Image (tube, rainbow, N blue to C red):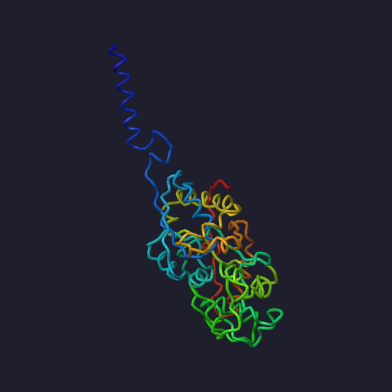
Amino acid sequence: MSTKTTACLVSAIIVLAVALQHGLATDSPTTTSRITLTLGFHPNVVVDLPLIRAVENGDFARQGFDVRFKPYGRPDLILAALKSGEIQGSLGISLELLLKQASSGSYPARGYLVWCLNATQGFDGFVTRADFSGRDVNALQGKAIGVYPSPQLQFFVSRILPNCTIKTYNPDVPFIGLNTGDVVAVFVKEPFISIARTKPDKYRVLEVNSISQHVFGGALVPAALSVLSSEWIEAHPKEAAKFVRLARQAYLEYITKPDINMVLTEPRLGGFTPEIAAQVVEPAASFPEALSRADLRRYATLLEAGGLISTNLSFDKLLYVPPVIEMP
């Protein structure tokens, strides 16, 4: 081998070594440092399914993300974890909680997907005992109704049934009051509507889509956000934009697959039977830039009328639309 050839090989080896040292030899995520994201979630929440399935299938890992899930028993615990930096985002968190923070000038997280209820999906409604003889929801006026311990939901139910007596229930076992006769009906969301339908000898689904029908006149009801920590977005702008692109792709791909509900059979999501999982209705999501601000403003204004928040809000701070992103 000539001296000239040897020198060229040595130069090539040096260049390659420097490139490898700085992670420039390839754009493949497998040769660069991985981005770790811990996301909180509330077991049994249907909006979590698309992202969980995408992570399990390796969609995020192939793009350099190490996504981990951490369960929390209550949505307010997710919010506290976001504020403390314990997690960097959440698969879904109540819009009620975030609006309450925002109305006081605090924006600990920003939403990249807005989960909505509408008048066709059957995601919320009233369940009675099977022997209840009333024809429709009007038969519940003046009765005791079990409601999830959320000021927002209690306010909505009071708008639907202004003469009812509201009693809060344990979110994990909402039907206990029905079984004991303490309440005549319970207002629940999925998956409990589907659970009730699998037991027609015990329960009757009296009505669905109640909030959209009776409170919002059939309009979209923004109910929850998939979020990233505001602090994490600011510190990692490129990574945040990339993650959101992947998350949106996951939603569009997995929300329409018939077998997605089978994820519900996993213990971390409640261990529901396939019979129940097959009936669960998937709610719809909107990208923040596609959702009418009027829908959000209508929602916030109604909560203000109920004394739950003030509407001194910045939706630009509450919602996250990356400046440059390849839309799925």
Q: Along the horizontal axis of the image, is 186 left or right of 75? A: right
Q: Residue furthest top?
A: 2
Q: x, y (%) of residue 238?
A: 46, 48
The quarter of the picture where the N terminus appears is top left
Residue in view at x 37 percent, y 62 percent: 86
Q: x, y (%) of residue 318?
A: 52, 63
Residue 311 to residue 63: above or below: below
Q: Residue furthest left?
A: 3
Q: x, y (%) of residue 169?
A: 51, 79
Residue in view at x 57 percent, y 69 percent: 195
Quarter of the figure with residue 286: bottom right
**Foreground pick, 123 / 234:** 123
**Foreground pick, 284 / 141:** 141
Residue 189 to residue 160: above or below: above
Q: Along the horizontal axis of the image, is 59 left or right of 20? A: right
Residue 188 to residue 139: above or below: above
Q: Residue furthest front?
A: 201
Total marks in image: 0
Q: x, y (%) of residue 179?
A: 55, 81
